[in-house]
Amino acid sequence: MPTKIILDENEIPKKWYNIQADMPNLPGIPHNPITKKAVEAKDLAPIFADGLIKQEFSTEKYIDIPPEVREILTLWRPSPLLRAERLEKLLKTPAKIYYKYEGQSPSGSHKTNTSVAQAYYNKEDGIERIATETGAGQWGSALSFATQFFGMECTIYMVRGSYEQKPYRKMMMQTWGAKCYPSPTTMTNSGREILKRDPNTSGSLGIAISEAVEDAATHENTNYALGSVLNHVCLHQTVIGLEARKQLDIAEETADIVIGCAGGGSNFAGIAFPFVRDKIEKKNPDVEIIASEPAACPTLTKGLYAYDFGDVAGLTPIMQMYTLGHDFIPPSIHAGGLRYHGMSPLVSRLHADGLIKSVAYHQNECFKVAVDFAKTEGIIPAPESAHAIKAAVEQALLCKKTGEEKTIVFNLSGHAHFDMSAYEAYFNKTLPDYEYPAELIKESLSKLPHIED
Ligand SMILES: *Cc1c(COP(=O)(O)O)cnc(C)c1O
């Protein structure tokens, strides 16, 4: 069998898979942050494109990918599925480990799968500028890349801690024509409010979201875009799992275990949802599907399944999801993309219904396997993706104990070429492992909004 399974350009999926058509239970309807009433499509219209709002609420099983979007996706899709044979040998495991590599996209992660689609639907609506937040900088670069293809401007609020840690991400966004500011800024009410309380804050994703939403809501020609969490974002990422399913068929394999790291849940959704479909449809009923999180921000693993805001200021709809509390600011781990207090409502619902599981790991143990992976497979994984590798390695080691030849598939969501300072800290042994911040989370969870159903 080949160790690298490549599909032809015309095998990029023509439709996204919408898991809302198949789920035994849908998440509760989001609620308006001010009126606390159920959100309708028209409430989202001031900041989101029409095509995206339709997808957010759609229960149609397959949704056509516009040809203009597919054409841009061909720049790096279909992405390869590779067998990590050298890693298997190192681990002396009977398990077979496959990984889907999303780091070949121009910005280095899976996020371009949705940024291109989001830019397309906004352009269709005549929008001239998109405002967004970025944590580690991956989403900001992915959206900058996409907006320039459609001749739109892009404003990015980048979490200050990352802005200072990762100057090259900022340069990337600039190269693609975007403007990037360290958040909190003095440009928005939400930013000024936070700075008044804590002038030295390193920022957080929740704060940056408040700033970008405020920017979009107060400018007619401007919409907002989110790089994860929302249903339409998870939808766009399903190209990952749909391709992987096809590639496994070619390799004559059936997945026993499917793994993705989870921050807001989108790359996990991308690899996982088509396999959840197989589980629901009883084509592969026993497949185990695992989301891997940081121990410092274990939303699915230790959070509460409740209604909460998506941001610190309470500007976003209130969503039913696993949450650590909307004003919880996670410790500054290097996997910036996994530092989010909430989780995709779709992923959350599947977790609450027992269709998927979650695990959480400390950053040093993730970097350790990331280095093993780099030495055996060549690719230096993003710190976020290292959490998926860690979970895959743990499963492979379990197989070694039991002698089972399971097929493990994980999503390698991106490379670390702009995160080498994190590896530097790991090699210098200056990387702290944060204990689960139980007190902070308890306090934050005491401030959940009240929803009457
Ligand atoms: C953003 C990011 C993540 C986390 O985001 P999800 O929406 O949970 O996928 C994971 N890996 C990489 C490389 C990222 O850039």
Image (spheres, helix red, strand yellow):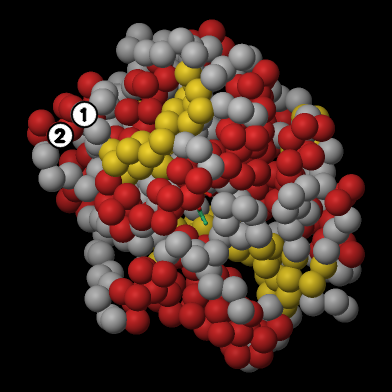
Q: Nearer the viewer, mark 1 or mark 2?
A: 1
Give the left or right position of residue 126, taking residue 205 as reference.
right
Give the left or right position of residue 7, taking residue 323 as reference.
right
Quick check: marks 1 and 2 in contact, CB under 8 Å?
yes
Circle number at residue 323: none
Residue matched to label 1: 186
Compared with 278, 327 (above or below) is above
Q: Residue 100 sits in which quadrant?
A: bottom right
Compared with 389, 196 (above or below) is above
In terms of sequence position, does the residue under pointer 1 or pointer 2 come before the other?
1
**Where the N terminus falls, by quadrant?**
bottom right
Q: Secondary structure at mark 2?
A: helix
- Is residue 23 in view from this perspective? no
Residue at (29% x, 41% y) in the render: 182
How busy is the neighbourhood of tag 1: few (under 14 within 10 Å), some, or many (20 plus)?
A: some
How busy is the neighbourhood of tag 2: few (under 14 within 10 Å), some, or many (20 plus)?
A: some
Dot 1 beta carbon under 8 Å from ligand 1: no
State the separation of the CA atoms marked 1 and 2: 8 Å
Question: In terms of depth relative to the viewer, which is nearer, 53 or 213?
Answer: 213
Identify the amino acid type marked 1. Answer: Thr
Dot 2 beta carbon under 8 Å from ligand 1: no
Q: Secondary structure at mark 1?
A: loop
Q: Position of residue 285 (x, y in %)?
A: 75, 55
Circle number at residue 195: 2
Q: Position of residue 30 (x, y in %)?
A: 47, 22
**Where the C terminus falls, by quadrant?**
top left
- Is residue 250 in view from this perspective? yes
Q: Residue 446 sits in which quadrant?
A: top left
Q: Residue 72 sits in which quadrant?
A: top right
Q: Position of residue 99 (x, y in %)?
A: 67, 67
Question: In terms of depth relative to the viewer, which is nearer, 370 or 390?
Answer: 370
Give the left or right position of residue 318, taking residue 261 as reference.
left
